[in-house]
Image (cartoon, rainbow, N blue to C red):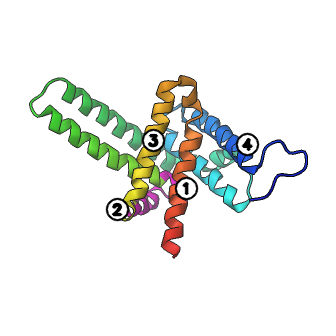
Amino acid sequence: MRTREAGEVFGPRMALFADVLSVGLATSLACLPLITAPAALSTACAVLRGAGQDRPVTAGRYFALLRQRLRAGDLVAGAVALAGLLLFAADLALAAAGLPGATVFAVTAAAIAACAAAVGLRACARPESLTDWRAAIREAARDAVADVGGSGLVLLAVATAALCAWMLLPLAFLAPGPLALALTAVDVRRSAAALR
């Protein structure tokens, strides 16, 4: 990490924080069609991963990379994610309707949704997600099983982002940036541990 230069008000960590927020805002805009959410989050993770390789972390680089990669596979991944989210919402609605065994059903549905979310989000952080979603999901599932602590961190990051958005609605537009940073950090942490 470089030191603060003469006349520089904030250090490099503050600059990275500002870059993360700008990428988060760009990701929020790209997620608005909902079906593009996995591609948008995956692109944010790729841009933030570039910070460790001295590549610029800017909204302009984010949109340039997103334009290059939007393809049918990304839209299919978005459709699957959206269908999973709608299925989970329907399951919770059924459990709330007072069916017999609703509590057990709701807990089971929540556990399955948490596992699916951890694998899906870890897949977004994988470099393979830029070109091959199946390979990214496969590797993310392996990582989720082998690194349960990392999966817990992913779910904690999602809970934190949701809580921030719930407490102050405008933060919902900035939350994807820190969430992508957390996902990238968990993936880099796992990759570094695998090299040892």
Percent coordinates x, y for residue 70 in the rendering: 58, 46
Which SS does the magenta portion mostly show? helix
- Disc 4 marks which residue? 60
Amino acid type, mark 1: Ala
Q: Is residue 103 left or right of residue 135?
A: left
Residue occupying image coordinates x 36% and y 36%: 85
Residue nearer the viewer, 137 or 149: 149
Circle number at residue 185: 1
Residue occupying image coordinates x 71% and y 49%: 13
Q: Which-is-in-front pick, marks 3 and 4?
A: 3
Q: Pick whichever of labels 3 and 2 is earlier in the sequence.
A: 2
Q: Is residue 128 visible?
A: no
Circle number at residue 145: 2
Q: Pick whichever of labels 1 and 3 is earlier in the sequence.
A: 3
Q: How many labels sit on residues?
A: 4
Relative to 62, does residue 138 appear above or below in the rendering?
below
Circle number at residue 158: 3
